[in-house]
Each structure stands twice: as structure tokens, then as C-alpha cells.
Amino acid sequence: MATTSSLTFQPVLERIAEEIERTPGRGAPADYIPALAACDPRSFGMAVAELDGTVYGVGDWREPFSTQSITKVFTLALDLAREGDELWEHVGREPSGNPFNSLVQLEYENGIPRNPFINAGALVVTDRLHSRTGDAAGELLSFLREESGNPALAFDEEVAASETAHGDRNAALAHFMSAYGNIDNDIPALLDQYFRQCSIRASCADLALATTFLARHGIRADGTRLLTLSQAKQINAIMLTCGTYDAAGDFAYRVGLPGKSGVGGGIIAVVPGRCTLCVWSPGLDERGNSVAGVAALDRFTTLTGVSVF
């Protein structure tokens, strides 16, 4: 096993890409959104961003893809920075053990979602950020543009429209939580914000850079503080325990880093105090995580010896 002092990131990424290229099974793209279903499951990109903004990459690391649930991390950070611990009265911090779009737990837990990264929890966070900003999706997009240094980041209107057309389960989650008084905004307006949020397209380079504030313990790219040390620790901890849906235990076992996946095939990961990563490959496993993405992150922590454990 090499360490980062003797093995720089670029050769590590190139070795990983070569190994992934030889891997036969890549899973299948998400099929409920036409724009995602059309992706090539053998596409692969990976980027590492250091705290000074230096970025290393390999493969399709500058190819924009649909961020989907990865954006939940940034929306959580933006809302937590505004309202602090009051947020945790409305959403929990525990793994769900159920699929990301499950309705099961909400009824016997009185409309309080288990964590901010399942769909119900993300709807609550988006709702609360929207109440505080008047445009949660716009606030998120501005943040991602600033942190990534890419002003061209944008919503994908085709994906947003497709998710709206297939959004009955998310609407059911929102209405159910509203019945318990845990949603403040009108449901159609909230769903529009949520689907636009998930539709943002960004590359591995963009997302690795945008995530570095979590590796800097809450400090943004311009040197200002977004989160307290405790809040940055909280988000990283929830990413580790809840960031890959009901596969979070296996992800922690294999990768050993806080991470957050999306059904577009992307995964971000954080090495606090050191660097951030983003990997993308559209082929998913049965739990909605990128097959090649998890394998690549597993190899990264194995080859470099970098993890939180």
C-alpha cells in the first residue's frame, strides 16, 4: 500500500481508470428518467481536488452529468448554516435501512424523515431553505457556481420535466409530511424546487471543487466560513452513515470516507483536512449507487491509505 507522500494523485487515478476499464460488470443506468437511461454505463470519470483548488482527473472527469441526489449535501449545508440546530427538530440523523424513496417509516415516526439524504428528508431541507431564501434551487445553483468556479453550471430542464412527470411518489412523501405540519410551502412549488435542484448538471471536476468546503471544515473557496467546525463534522458524519442509502454500511466498510451518491451515477467523497473526490459512471447497482464509482473509491483508499479510519 502506498501513501500520498510517495504516490501522487494523478498516477493513482490513471491506475484506477485502467482497472475499471477491465471490469466487466458496470450495472445499468437509472431507467425512470429518459435522459439518464440513455447514458453509456461504461462512461467513467474521476477527479480529486486538493484544498488549494488543484484538481487531478482521469477519463470523463470534465463531462457534465446529472447530479441528482448529490445536491442534497449542498442544500443541507446551506440550510444548516442559516438555521442551525433547529433543523434537527424536523429531520433525523439516523440511517433509514429502507430505499431512498420509501414511505414506510414516515407514518410511525410522525412525519419526521430519518435523515436529510433520503427523498423525504431532502424535501424537508429544501422546503426549509426555500422558506428562508425564496428560491432554494437558485441559491443552490449560485453556491455551486461559486465554489466550483464554473459560472456555466445550469439546470437541465429536460431532466426536471421528466422527474416532474414521474414524481408521484415524491409528491406523496411531501403531502404526507405536510399533514404532520412538517412542510411549510405549497407542495407544487416545493416539488418544482426539488426537481430543479436534482437536475443540475456538473462534472467530476466541478463537484470535487464544490465539495472542498467540507474538507476545509466549513471554509468556502473565498476563505469565508459557511459552517462551524461542528456543523461540518455533522454533515460529514451523516454522509458516512446515510450518504449511499441503504448501502451506507457497505460503503463505509469498503471505502472508509464520507460520501454521497446520486442516481445519475456520481459519488462525492470527503477526506477531511486533505482533499475531496468525485467519481462518475452511470451504471448503478440495485441500491442506486454507481458500480464502477464505488469500486474506484474503494481502490483509491486502498492504494493511498487515505480514509477516516
Image: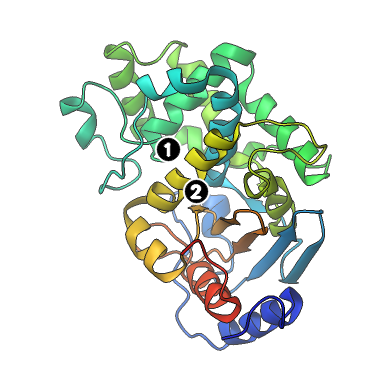
Residue occupying the point 54% across, 73% down:
301
53 sits to left or right of 35: right
**Residue 234 vs residue 189, the one in the foreground:** 234
127 sits to left or right of 56: left
Residue occupying the point 56% across, 75% down:
305
Q: Mark 2, residues whose alpha carbon is within 10 Å: few (<14), some, or many (≥20)?
A: many
241 sits to left or right of 37: left
Q: Mark 1, residues whose alpha carbon is within 10 Å: few (<14), some, or many (≥20)?
A: few
Q: Is residue 151 above or below residue 226?
A: below
Whether residue 154 is visible, yes or no, is no
Q: Amino acid at mark 2?
A: Ile
Question: CA separation, marks 2 and 1?
Answer: 8 Å
Quadrant of the frame with the N terminus:
bottom right
Residue occupying the point 69% across, 49% down:
212
Q: Amino acid at mark 1?
A: His
Q: Which residue is mark 1?
A: 166
Where residue 41 appears, as percent x and y from the top left, is 54, 70
Q: Residue furthest left?
A: 108
Where residue 206 appears, as percent x and y from the top left, is 74, 51
Q: Are marks 2 and 1 in contact (CB under 8 Å)?
A: yes
**Residue 232 vs residue 289, the one in the foreground:** 232
Q: Which residue is mark 2?
A: 33
Q: Is residue 145 above or below residue 209?
A: above
**Mark 1: which secondary structure?**
loop
